[in-house]
Image: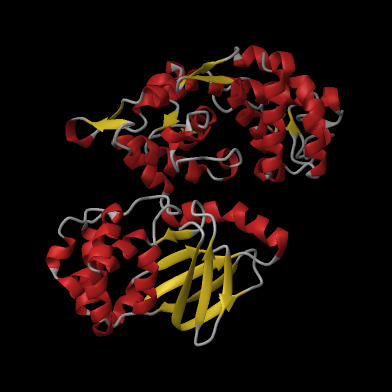
């Protein structure tokens, strides 16, 4: 829905203006839904909708109890770049960037509503070839005149929520920063369930085969299997390499740097979408999927080194920080192990001192300090700049561990200023895109 304008009419609506995103909620008329389907795609939706039990149930409600549809359905979530009020409960929505604006959630509702309207207007034969949303536009165009003639016979209301930015540059920036997270959250309400299902389908087999064998038994590959390391942490790290693949391979399955810290659920959902695509993987026995794409396979093979480099960054970060700006241990969220203080009267009640030696996340190596990983995530993401892409196949340009040991102290001379500007808050550091861009530029310049 790139550069489209659309007028929606609500039967009733309410507005919310005081939050980060502006929002209109209401029930939209059939005519509004028809005009939306005229221009709709699902590019902004993380998943493509396909027919099944869910769409059958929606159509059953529309046919047998249309007056209850607005109560039984979550409806649609639309993101618009602008929203202008008109007369008679109408609003003009502007969709500017089709990748992040359009239908964020409710793709199965849209598919079911489109099929139902075509069936009512032109009979069952009009929709026999429709298996997923991709099949709708051609059939819809073919039957559009019949739909126009008979739309007056349809009577149901659809819940619709529209989110759009506040006026001004700041409002637009807040909108662009938040909208992908909103889309992923609405489409991924059961993160661990999705991880377990994906593991069952074989989507994580390539990662299991690629990582250090000594780590495999430590990973919680499915819910409650006893692993100490969440598989979502590995999936998030896999995007360091996957992000270096060509655009024609990734398509809309793209992850930003800040997502590996702030939106691990988004990382999981996008990874699962990518690995589930035909051409990336193929079905084998019992619908188990096997990775077949050489480029994606080369990216995942780099997971052999990434957890170890993550741990190395965590170990070396405090000393590198102190070499650039002393006082790492004085940061409020940083705690340390000092055997001279533990158990002593001086340190027994001081939360800054730990009773046990802190360890790294993956290999459980001893550390002097314990601190939130928001401080190092921009550096972890910047490892992507050490990865070469030659004809779609990824490999390390240089040994990442040696690079970190050689350059981390110098990189912190640049990066410690961002931490200071964030008031030493690791969540702000981990969620600020500029931190990731800065370290990517730094690593790119230092990489031989």
Q: Nearer the viewer, residue 281 or 202?
A: 281
Q: Is residue 104 visible?
A: yes
| Relative height, residue 28 to residue 105 (above, below) | below
| Residue farthest along the right direction in this orientation | 326
Q: Nearer the viewer, residue 358 or 441?
A: 441
Q: Quadrant of residue 320?
A: top right
Q: Position of residue 85 (x, y in %)?
A: 57, 79
Q: Position of residue 97 (x, y in %)?
A: 53, 55
Q: Is residue 338 visible?
A: no
| Relative height, residue 319 to residue 94 (above, below) | above
Q: Nearer the viewer, residue 120 or 50?
A: 120
* Residue at the image position 36 percent from the left and 59 percent from the top: 107
Q: Nearer the viewer, residue 329 or 239?
A: 239
| Left or right of 1, for residue 140 | left
Q: Position of residue 390 (x, y in %)?
A: 49, 18
* Residue at the image position 71 percent from the left and 59 percent from the top: 169
Q: Quarter of the image for the C terminus: give it.
A: top right
| Residue farthest along the bottom direction in this orientation | 88
* Residue at the image position 33 percent from the left and 64 percent from the top: 110
Q: Quadrant of residue 387?
A: top right
Q: Position of residue 66 (x, y in %)?
A: 26, 79
| Left or right of 341, for residue 165 | left
Q: Quarter of the image for the N terminus: give it.
A: bottom left
| Left or right of 70, for residue 150 | left
- Number of numbered callouts drawn: 0
| Relative height, residue 21 to residue 425 (above, below) | below
| Scheme of colours in the image | secondary structure
């Amino acid at each position: 829905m790139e550069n489209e304008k659309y007028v929606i009419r609500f039967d009733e609506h309410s507005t919310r203006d005081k939050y980060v995103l502006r929002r209109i909620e209401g029930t939209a008329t059939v005519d509004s839904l028809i005009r939306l389907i005229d221009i709709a795609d699902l590019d902004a939706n993380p998943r493509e909708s396909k027919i099944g039990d869910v769409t059958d149930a929606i159509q059953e409600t529309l046919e047998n109890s249309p007056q209850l549809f607005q109560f039984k359905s979550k409806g649609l979530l639309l993101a618009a770049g602008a929203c202008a009020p008109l007369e008679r409960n109408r609003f003009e929505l502007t969709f500017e960037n089709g990748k992040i604006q359009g239908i964020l959630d409710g793709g199965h509702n849209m598919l079911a509503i489109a099929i139902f309207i075509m069936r009512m207007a032109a009979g069952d034969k009009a929709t026999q070839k429709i298996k997923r949303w991709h099949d709708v536009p051609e059939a819809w165009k073919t039957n559009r005149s019949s739909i126009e003639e008979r739309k007056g016979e349809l009577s149901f209301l659809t819940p619709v929520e529209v989110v759009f930015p506040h006026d001004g540059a700041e409002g637009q920036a807040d909108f662009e920063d938040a909208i992908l997270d909103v889309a992923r959250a609405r489409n991924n309400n059961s993160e661990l369930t999705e991880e377990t299902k994906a593991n069952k389908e074989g989507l994580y087999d390539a990662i299991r085969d690629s990582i250090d064998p000594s780590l495999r038994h430590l990973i919680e590959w499915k819910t409650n299997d006893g692993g100490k390391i969440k598989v979502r942490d590995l999936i998030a790290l896999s995007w360091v390499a996957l992000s270096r693949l060509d655009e024609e391979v990734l398509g809309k399955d793209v992850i930003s740097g800040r997502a590996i810290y702030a939106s691990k659920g988004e990382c999981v959902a996008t990874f699962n979408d990518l690995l589930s695509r035909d051409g990336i993987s193929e079905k084998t026995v019992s619908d188990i999927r096997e990775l077949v794409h050489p480029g994606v396979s080369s990216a995942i093979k780099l997971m052999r080194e990434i957890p170890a480099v993550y741990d190395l960054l965590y170990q070396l970060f405090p000393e590198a920080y102190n070499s650039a700006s002393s006082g790492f241990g004085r940061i409020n969220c940083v705690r340390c192990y000092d055997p001279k203080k533990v158990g002593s009267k001086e340190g027994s009640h001081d939360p800054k001192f730990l009773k046990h030696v802190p360890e790294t996340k993956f290999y459980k190596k001893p550390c002097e300090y314990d601190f939130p990983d928001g401080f190092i995530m921009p550096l972890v993401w910047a490892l992507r700049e050490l990865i070469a892409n030659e004809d779609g196949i990824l490999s390390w340009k240089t040994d990442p561990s040696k690079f970190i040991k050689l350059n981390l102290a110098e990189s912190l001379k640049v990066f410690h200023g961002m931490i200071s500007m964030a008031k030493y808050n690791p969540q702000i550091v981990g969620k600020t895109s500029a931190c990731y861009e800065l370290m990517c530029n730094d690593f790119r310049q230092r990489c031989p």
